Image (cartoon, rainbow, N blue to C red):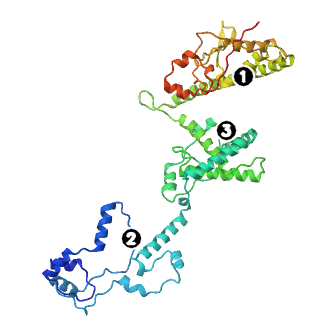
Amino acid sequence: MEQRHARTNPPTGMARPNPSPSNMQTQDTRTTPSLDTIRRIRNSRGTSHRTRLIGISTEGDEAWQAPSSYHHHVASGEQIPATTPIPEPRHCQSSNRAQPESSEEMQDSGTVPAGNALTAEGIAKAVKATLRNLLSQTPHLLRTNKCSPRRRKAEDLDVAHERATEPSHHRDFVLKEVRELFKRKFNISQDADFLAINPALASDVDAFEKEDGDRPDPDNLAFDLRHSYNSPWNTDIIELLLKEFQGSAKEEQWPVQKSDNYVREILKNRYKKLRTAWFKGQPKLTQNGALETPEEVEARLVSELNKQGKESRQGTRRRNKYDRRVMTLDHITKLKSEMRADDVQVWEWLSRLIKTLSHHGMSSEESVVENDIEHVLRVKQMSWRRCIDKELEIIDTERLLDSDIFARQGAKPVKRIRAYDNPESRRDPVPGLPMAMYDSAWISSLPQRELDALDVSPDTFPWMKVATI
């Protein structure tokens, strides 16, 4: 017990009385405030197992060894004479060495005096000097692609406000210049050429992001197509493209000048679109679990391209049909108003009907050849929309009857066939319309979840039965 007590109480160079049983009993019953505080903190917070260490080299310093007399006194439990010198460690003896003139000079030099090697101040200075040297050699570690939610929201609001207040031809100009920039930097002429682009090497990306590798080469840019635009490598490329874009805008004095956040958002969207096209060109797993061959990849891409072309043509016809109907109704309504005709309210109601449905509510057509001679369009059925075939036929017929609306020159309107056996439209129903625009039987068959998602407008649309005389 006496030996353990002597080991747990390191010598201080002062004489101590020999411990007696009475003294030992008194020491066992007493409590130490410092130890009690440590116990309370440990019990309340627990012990952290995620310890981080830092070591500082002390070359030339020898480990401190106590003299043999000290071990003799401790082993025998005798009192340590006050005259017995206990040497200090060598790093403590060297505290009288010449110090730098100021702490700034010591930090700039990246060295820490040996006298402060084991002190908290010395460790802090060593860490600062090490980090300063590391970051000066690898400046890309200072960059971060993360942004606080508040700052991101403010930037999004600024971009949204800039888009809402700009003319449409300004955005078209910026989009065109961004496309030209990508064509020039990646040597492509259209989006389909991006399928053959080689992504950045994984070793270069990992060296840049995790070590001190080189940045992307401005003269030979290559995206890391495995990740989105917010990865460190792709973020650096986006910033390089942004710098070149804004530099060209100032040097060539473009008529449209946009903020960095606005252009950066367009560059990100452009990368997302090209990355999606690149992923489509990669081999996929077949039903047999094997990767597609190059021939199978080409056949799949051609099929998807034909499908997109067909949908694009249908969308174009749908918008053109809407524009023709609106133009017809506006012209007829104006003529009827000038003539003070008694059916002007009916034509105004038809105009409100078409404009409420918008071009999204117009049906699509499928081009077919009837009787191997005539080219016709079979109108697809829209089960969700109220039946307005009679109203639409009146509008389309009026366009043919009134030569003042459309000239006779040009291609003749293609015949449209409406029949119950026509194919069903695959487009989703248009949400947010008044209840009068939806088919009552279709609405009653919807579950409550789909009815809520439809978000029917609370506005009322008075219905009118229309007939020709």
Q: Amino acid at mark 2?
A: Gly
Q: Residue furthest right?
A: 339
Q: Amino acid at mark 3?
A: Ser
Q: Taking the image as drawn, is residue 180 in sight?
A: no
Q: Which residue is mark 2?
A: 55
User: Residue 189 — which label?
Assistant: 3
Task: Give the answer, above or below, for where 432 lies relative to 9.
Answer: above
- Marks 3 and 1, the one that precedes in the sequence: 3
Circles 3 and 1 in contact, beta carbons < 8 Å = no
- Marks 2 and 3, the one that precedes in the sequence: 2
Q: Which residue is mark 1?
A: 352
Mark 2 crowdedness (10 Å alpha carbons): few <14, some 14-19, many ≥20: few
- Marks 2 and 1, the one that precedes in the sequence: 2
Q: Taking the image as drawn, is residue 291 in sight?
A: yes
Q: Amino acid at mark 1?
A: Arg
Q: Is 123 situated left or right of 349 in this image?
A: left
Mark 1 crowdedness (10 Å alpha carbons): few <14, some 14-19, many ≥20: some
* Distance of label 3 from label 1 (alpha carbons): 44 Å
Closer to the observer: label 3 or label 1? 1
Closer to the observer: label 2 or label 1? 1
Task: Give the answer, above or below, for where 322 lies relative to 176.
Answer: above
Circles 2 and 3 in contact, beta carbons < 8 Å = no
Q: In the image, residue 389 lies at what x, y percent?
A: 67, 13
* Distance of label 2 from label 3 (alpha carbons): 56 Å
Looking at the rendered structure, the secondary structure element under dot 1 is helix
